[in-house]
Amino acid sequence: MLRVLTSASVALGPRAAGWVRTMASHQLLVAPPEALLKPLSVPSRLLLGPGPSNLAPRVLAAGGLQMIGHMHKEMYQIMDEIKQGIQYVFQTRNPLTLAVSGSGHCVLETAVVNLLEPGDPFLVGVNGIWGQRAAEIGERVGARVHPMTKDPGGYYTLQEVEEALAQHKPVLLFLTHGESSSGVLQPLDGYGDLCRRYNCLLLVDSVASLGGVPIHMDQQGIDVLYTGSQKVLNGPPGTSLISFNDKAKNKIYTRKTKPYSFYMDVKWLANFWGCDNKPRMYHHTTPVIGLYSLRESLALIVEKGLENSWRQHREATAYLQGRLQGLGLQLFVKDPALRLPTVTTVSVPAGYDWRDIVNYLMDHFSIEITGGLGPSLGKVLRIGLLGCNATRENADRVTEALQQALQHCPRNKL
């Protein structure tokens, strides 16, 4: 090897020869990992937690397509088709509609860091982990955060929101449409009109609800709406969807300070996604393969139709909830009108450790369900029927697995 390197140094000249000698002057400290010399092994599992969900076959196939450049004209065409798909599933005509290169947390942060400046009052519905995260991001931005805190399972009435708007006079209100940590569906009708009366923007998280629950961004007066790719859309995590109406756009474009994140700067993203009628400029390298998959996810729901998707989730989840109650399990959200039709929460049955139940389903049936998250940790089990997983067959499979778990998991009878 040394003889080869010496010969190479002569052929490459004195400058390159020094580089070759440097390359040869250190021994490798880290050996090739044995694990990476073996084939990749991924188990086959039925993902019936709150997300991510199993990929639809067409989405899975899109992930195997060859790469193209992120600024090729064909990629811009795919991006334009994604925008049209987002406008359909959001039911909006907003030109400022795009996908963010990041998960649901990333798109939440994108919304907050662009809409808020230091000192802005920010009203946050905190009835689960997503409100907690929104409040945390608002604090990091330097906003004056006013949390409306409720126990898991709670929601916000128009009267409660109006009282808080009158008291705090926020520039932005955050509500979670589908609180996946507790299984609550937050009503939205009337909240946009209420915010307009108080000169406040309405920001809505629909990560766990979009595609499974009716939502009409423009007609419900939602100023900013976002969701993720990995739940009802049955796409891989890593891309997310967001739309801003003209009022929200004006708030962003008249800021006195730049958003603290360049990567999430909506002005740059709007240009790169062709939302500002100007020549597109490079901002960042998008996850091209992930965008293929997102395009196909949106195409599937366009082909199915929103109304059919809503009905599928409503019927499959109603059937699941009936089966769960047949096992003697208690639904965590008592009011049927407030139960999220995508993620069902049941109270952890008395005497059981929720971890034992979750592990039993994974170990014996290769089915994923999860426990609570954030404020609901230790209180609930969460079962998701999302997108192509929202079937009576899957409801039967998870119910029968739960029945076995309740028979075999240890129970403290004290």
Image: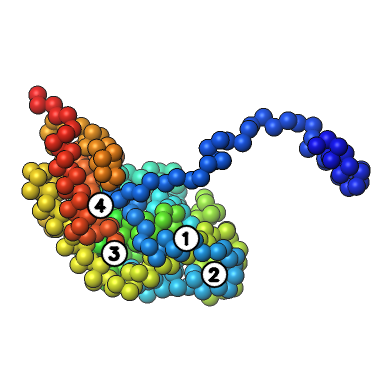
Place of residue 177 in the rendered image (x, y in percent of width and height, measured from the top left): 26, 57
Place of residue 76 in the rendered image (x, y in percent of width and height, measured from the top left): 54, 71
Q: Residue under circle 1?
A: 63
Callout 2: 10 Å neighbours few (<14), some, many (20+)?
some
Above or below — where is 333 with respect to 243?
above
Q: Residue under circle 4?
A: 384
Q: Amino acid at mark 1?
A: Gly
Q: Which comes sooner in the sequence, label 3 or label 2?
A: 2
Residue 146: tell me if it is visible: no
Residue drawn 23% across the image and 33% down it? 356
Q: Picture quarter containing residue 88?
A: bottom left
Q: Amino acid at mark 3?
A: Gly
**Pointer 1 with pointer 4, Cβ within 8 A:** no
Q: Amino acid at mark 2?
A: Met
- Tag in front: 1 or 4: 1
Helix, strand or loop at label 4? It is strand
**Pointer 1 with pointer 3, Cβ within 8 A:** no
Q: Residue under circle 3?
A: 211
| Separation of marks 3 and 4 at Cα, in angstroms | 13 Å
Helix, strand or loop at label 3? It is loop
Quick check: 402 left or right of 4? left
**Pointer 3 with pointer 4, Cβ within 8 A:** no
| Separation of marks 1 and 4 at Cα, in angstroms | 24 Å
Assign the N terminus to one quadrant of the image.
top right
Q: Nearer the viewer, residue 120 or 259?
A: 259
Q: Amino acid at mark 4?
A: Gly
Q: Which numbered tag is attached to residue 75?
A: 2
| Separation of marks 3 and 2 at Cα, in angstroms | 25 Å
Q: Which comes sooner in the sequence, label 2 or label 4?
A: 2
- Tag in front: 3 or 4: 4
**Pointer 2 with pointer 4, Cβ within 8 A:** no
Place of residue 333 in the rendered image (x, y in percent of width and height, measured from the top left): 14, 48
